[in-house]
Amino acid sequence: MSAEHARVALFDMDDTLLPADSDSLWNTWLADVGAVDPVARRRDQQRFGAQYVAGTLDIGEFMAFQLAPLAAHPRGVLDRWRTQFIHERVAPILTDAAKRCVAAHAGEHCALVTATNRWIAEPVAALFGIDAVIATEPEQAPDGRFTGRVAGVPAFREGKITRVEAWLVERGLALDTVARSTFYSDSRNDIPLLERVTHPVAVDPDPMLAAHARALGWPVISLRGVTAEVTA
């Protein structure tokens, strides 16, 4: 399909397609299986969460916190935990409205675009039938173990634009030339990418994004129930 006829649909993950934050859910899971200190993990998660809401999050510091447990355990153990985590904590909370939203873009170039690390994001994308995942990349050693560091540009704020544009270039496309581009997100941190697409959609938005969307006339929808207005 030529660029002038191509349609692109981008979906944020946490608090957008998912009615919760996967990083928080994962940290609770780690505490429940005894992999981390529950008190310290909860304290730091709340601190980073507050920074994210305020738009002051240092993504490097947060990813070091989030990826540290991956570096502390063998891949076999981690992969088993992830399977259980997705089955028990993520799959049960998917909403019909979110599934309908993704389904409405069938046939388009669809991608999950999230600051969450790819190792967690990929199985979530699979639950929605989304093949392409643009996420923060956790660095891996030659033997497959995680190092606890980030590889490349984190998919956060302007980094999402950088990563999306690189993904589109691989397909012979560009944000500025496709016929239609849609991005669904809940967060003020995604305003840079929302402002780059032709059809930005605020989903259960935080207060700053809600105000921004109202001022610019962007659609504001909810994906928390069984039905939702979907612009496709």
Image: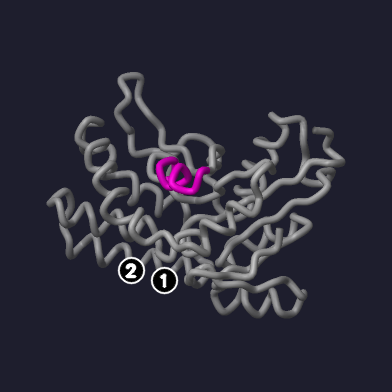
Around disc 1, counting alpha carbons within 10 Å, would you say few (fewer than 14), some (14 to 19), or many (20 or more)?
few
> Picture coordinates of residue 144 (x, y %)?
32, 24
At mark 1, the secondary structure is helix
Which amino acid type is marked by label 2?
Answer: Gln
Viewer-side residue, 103 vs 147: 103
Res. 92 image quadrant: bottom left
Residue extending furthest right?
4
Viewer-side residue, 35 vs 4: 4
Which amino acid type is marked by label 1?
Answer: Ala
Around disc 2, counting alpha carbons within 10 Å, would you say few (fewer than 14), some (14 to 19), or many (20 or more)?
few
> Picture coordinates of residue 185 (x, y %)?
59, 62
Residue indicated by mark 2: 46
Q: Which residues are magenta?
A: 121-129
Question: Is 221 colored magenta in this rendering?
Answer: no
Residue indicated by mark 1: 50
Q: Is residue 212 above or below residue 198?
A: below
Inter-mark Cα distance, 2 to 1: 6 Å
